[in-house]
Image: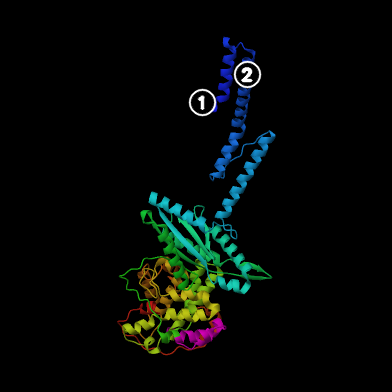
Amino acid sequence: MKLIRGGWPFGVALVAIVLIASPSAGDPLLRLVLLAAVAVGLAAAVTQAYVRSRIEPLIAAAERIAAGDSSVLVPRRSDRLGRRLAAAVGAMSVRVAASRADASTDELTSLANRTSIAGTLFTEVERAVRYRRPLAVAFADIDHFKTINDTFGHEAGDIVLRGIADALRSQLRASDFLGRYGGEEFMIVLPETTVDEAAALADKLRLFAAGQRFMLGDGQSVTVTLSFGVTGAQGDRLRVDTLVREVDAAMYSAKALGRDQVYAFVEPDDDSTVIRSPISPVGRAQAMELGRLAHGAAAEALASIISPLPHYRGRPSALIATIVSALAKSLDLPAHEVDKIRVAALLHDVGKVGVPQDILEKPAALTPVEWRSVVQHPRIGQVILEQATTLRDAVPIILHHHERFGGAGYPYGLRGNEIPLGARIVAIADAYDAMIQDRPYKKKISHEAAVEEMRRHSGTQFDPELVELFCDIYGARAPEADPAALGFAAAIDSHRRTPRQEEPAERSALRTAHAG
């Protein structure tokens, strides 16, 4: 049938030629009709051959373009009609490709838009399930983005969005996928990546983004921070809707816990005994009042308020500031990050102003009710510094400096890289300082004994890499306080400490390392 449908012109001509040659074709009129049939058949055959050789490739190209193939090469033609048709098909290919790009690309940042990055996530989940491979997803959200729009205008907000998109794109691997999920929120799909690896990458991105300065014109510039949520799984445990729900919850947890940090999603554990330390109305009222006093005067006013206090009640420590600065610089952190950690170290116990003095100075064991009062102080410190707007960068560090690397710390029971790096650094310096100082409830121990305690709790209470770094720097000799490390609080050294009572011999050297 195909031969009959496609080769009919040749068939007509052939039949006409046979009839002309037959004896029955003696009639001149009949021979004339047959000759006309031969001519028509041959003309139709030539026309069909031309269409097949010249036009059909263009039709095939148009069909592939319509089917979504953007890599089609339109055949060139030398004849006038062929050139026109080839140009029309080529223009159609360009328009279709541009339309598809517009439909999948965010116009402002040139990243994949929400529909496109969601499609990528679906594809990567299918691949990871098929081959039983790990897959992680991260959400990044620009902190206080509304303030930038309100203060500098939406054009400034657009500059920041483009700048953050470029910063994230420059630090990702070729196999990673980045898209703008909506507003000031970005999604990163990380194939072949575990949750721990994704959290480490997110923290690298967080630090890099925080180091960028965006020029707004007229000599103005801004810096911003990012909050990251991370989740993931492996193989058949992966579900697109579950990943999106978990990573969104993790990102909002990062913002709720103080912003400028990475939070990895963890399923709630019904057996968890971690104290969640809600703030009492009295503690919150005291924190808000102190925050209002410090608002606008920032570190100077806050230092003047807490400088008369004993060291164990929140007074800044030059030794702690010296240690954290040394550790942060050894990690090659940016200068602004070193300073943020130093300021957080100076103010890490400011929340103790909301804890009753008789509890902080009690020489005996604390009751459960008293202990709940003590573990409020990181949350109270968070409230204070959130009121003092210029000190907000230090909030995540202060809030989490009593989390434990192995979990079971407070106020949120974070573990490992879920704890901000600055908080892990301050935890080590705070614990060391607590162990070598007399407190109402304990006697001090030697530098060598404190180093041994740090090693003994490496990996459980403290980040093991930071413990090793501390020991490399200070293992052979005790750190010496540098008054210059106090910066804005330098005048504090002129204040004398209040006398302290002796501690019963059975009290642990690390009670202060954990309770502050």
Dot 1, crowdedness within 10 Å: few (<14), some or many (≥20)?
few
Q: Is residue 428 left or right of residue 42?
A: left
Residue 75 falls inside the magenta stretch: no
> In which quadrant will I find the C terminus?
bottom left
Q: Position of residue 18 (x, y in %)?
A: 57, 15
Residue type at mark 1? Leu
Image quadrant in which you'd find residue 296: bottom right
Comes first in the chain, label 2 or label 1: 1
The disc placed on residue 3 is 1
Dot 2, crowdedness within 10 Å: few (<14), some or many (≥20)?
few
Q: Are marks 2 and 1 in contact (CB under 8 Å)?
A: no
Q: Which residues are magenta?
A: 285-312
Residue 219 shows in the view: yes
When the figure is inspected, residue 126 is found, relative to residue 185, above or below; the finding is above
Q: Between 55 and 296, which is closer to the camera in this rendering?
A: 55
Q: Position of residue 21 (x, y in %)?
A: 59, 12
Residue bearing mark 2: 33
The kind of secondary structure element at disc 2 is helix
Image quadrant in which you'd find residue 459: bottom left
Which residue: 33% across, 68% down? 269
Tally of numbered discs: 2
When the figure is inspected, residue 65 is found, relative to residue 450, above or below; the finding is above
Which residue: 37% across, 73% down? 409
The disc placed on residue 349 is none
The kind of secondary structure element at disc 1 is helix
Image quadrant in which you'd find residue 456: bottom left
When the figure is inspected, residue 102 is found, relative to residue 376, above or below; the finding is above
Q: Position of residue 331 (x, y in %)?
A: 50, 66
Q: Main secondary structure of the magenta part?
A: helix
Which of pointers 2 and 1 indicates the residue nearer the eye?
2
Q: Is residue 332 left or right of residue 476?
A: right
Residue 288 falls inside the magenta stretch: yes
